[in-house]
Amino acid sequence: MWECFDAGGEWHNPEANFDNTGQSMVTLFTAVTTEGWADLMWAGVDASDQFLMPQKNRNPIIILYFVFFMNFCSIIMLNLFVGVLIDSNYRE
């Protein structure tokens, strides 16, 4: 980070990050909507330590987390959708 500043550059975190709990929840909610979740997964794979720039394919095990998370959340969302559909049919 300091080398970037010394060269006259700027240091920016990506919009979707896990820097704090609130931002982590927003990032995971964005992933659940399936809008750009693959880009988020690859950013997680490339993530490195604090104040260091990303390194390509540094943490490939993170892929398992994202695939599990997406499958788990999609099953929950499908169950909620089916539950609302069945509940609305019984009320008529």
Image: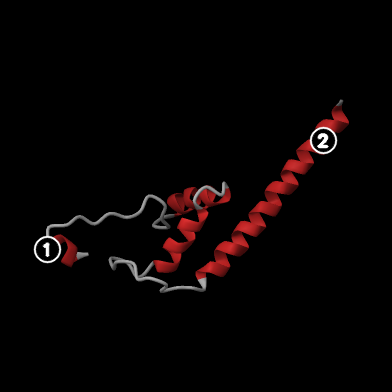
Considering only vertical position in the picture, is 60 above or below 70?
below
Instruction: Name the image quarter holding the C terminus.
Output: top right
Residue for badge 1: 6
Asked which quadrant contains residue 45, the reply is bottom left
Crowd band around label 2 with a 10 angstrom C-alpha radius: few (<14), some (14–19), many (20+): few
Q: What's the residue at 57%, 69% (across, down)?
A: 64
Colour style of the rendered protein structure:
secondary structure
Where is residue 49, by image quadrant?
bottom left
Q: Residue at x 70, y 53 (%)?
A: 75
Q: Which residue is mark 2?
A: 87
Where is residue 48? Give x, y as percent: 36, 70
Q: Residue 84: x and y, percent?
A: 76, 37
Q: Indicate whether 64 appears above or below 37.
A: below
Mark 1 / mark 2, whichever is N-terminal: 1
Q: Residue at x 42, y 72 (%)?
A: 57
Q: Position of residue 77 (x, y in %)?
A: 68, 47
**Residue type of the residue flagged with mark 2:** Asp
Work out whether 16 lies above or below 1.
Answer: above
